[in-house]
Amino acid sequence: MSKIPQDASMAIEDLKINSYDEDNDLIAAVVRDKTPQLKIGVPSCPTVVLGKGSKPETELHVDVCLDEDIPLRRRPGGGCAVVIDPGNIIISVVLPTQGIKDNTKYFHALSDWLIQGLHRLGIDRVRGAGISDLTIEDRKIAGASIYRTAEYLYYSTTLLVEPRIELIERYLKHPPREPQYRQGRKHRDFIISLKQVYPSHDTTTLAEALRRTLSAGVTQLPV
């Protein structure tokens, strides 16, 4: 028997969740040309993005999402729900691959590639943590997801440069799953903005710098 109250169930039915299709052009190019593709962008507005298996009643403050009509999207990859906003940089990579094995290898290779790119820009305190997070001093600055088919691997990560952490607290409950290093910390205590540590960087200029820095290395990623 469902443990969700009837009024909550009705609220969940009112949620309109669209597909996250921002990178379909990258996927189509990889399927067609069999060459790695990279996109770096900044969201135009705050949006809640759910993972492939995310349950709104478990991960979202559904009533707040409905009251404020926050856009809801569902990505093809796994992981829990996140909030993206214009203070984030979204880095997406699609690689031509065969089969669906070795996700951990790809997570590590892509995290290392991104860390090295940040280091070249003077952001040299970033480290990997968990399966796919990037951190500064044990606080999260980026999280990623992967989606696989027999033809390609789709990787997307959100770099928290100037995030509106109050929106994360407003729309998201504490996640039902968390990496061990989080140790039950609340969103505000777990997340850190990159600009807080590196105040000379802002979202727009860092996005442009990452486009220049990462583009050359994307062809060197494993396929």
Image (cartoon, grey):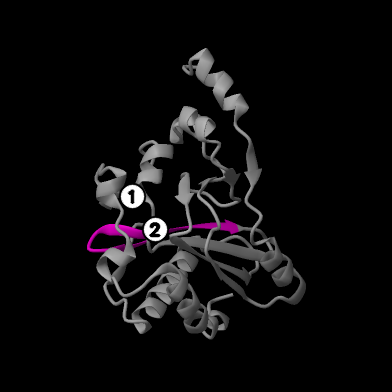
Residue 99 image position (x, y, % from top left): 64, 63
Q: Is 138 included in the stretch rendered in magenta?
A: yes
- Picture residue at 55% right of the left edge, 57% below the top: 44
Does residue 161 appear anywhere in the picture?
Answer: yes
Q: Which residue is mark 1?
A: 179
- Residue identified by numbered label 2: 131
Residue at the spot 56% in from the left edge and 36% down from the top edge:
69
Q: Position of residue 10 (x, y in %)?
A: 58, 19
Decide which of 166, 189 is in the foreground and name it: 166
Local packing at callout 1 (Cα closer than 10 Å; few below 14, some 14-19, many 20+) is few
Q: Going from the N terminus, do you reach mark 1 or mark 2 first?
A: 2
- Residue 72 position in % (x across, y down): 57, 42
**Residue type for callout 1:** Pro
Q: Quadrant of the C terminus?
A: bottom right
Tag 2, which secondary structure? loop
- 14 relative to 115, above or below: above
Frontmost residue, 38 versus 193: 193
Label 1 sits on a secondary structure element that is loop
Query: Is 188 above or below relative to 67?
Result: below
> Which residues fall within the magenta stretch?
132-147
Q: Main secondary structure of the magenta part?
A: strand
Q: Residue at x 60, y 60 (%)?
A: 100
Residue 177 sits in which quadrant?
A: top left
Kind of residue at badge 2: Ile
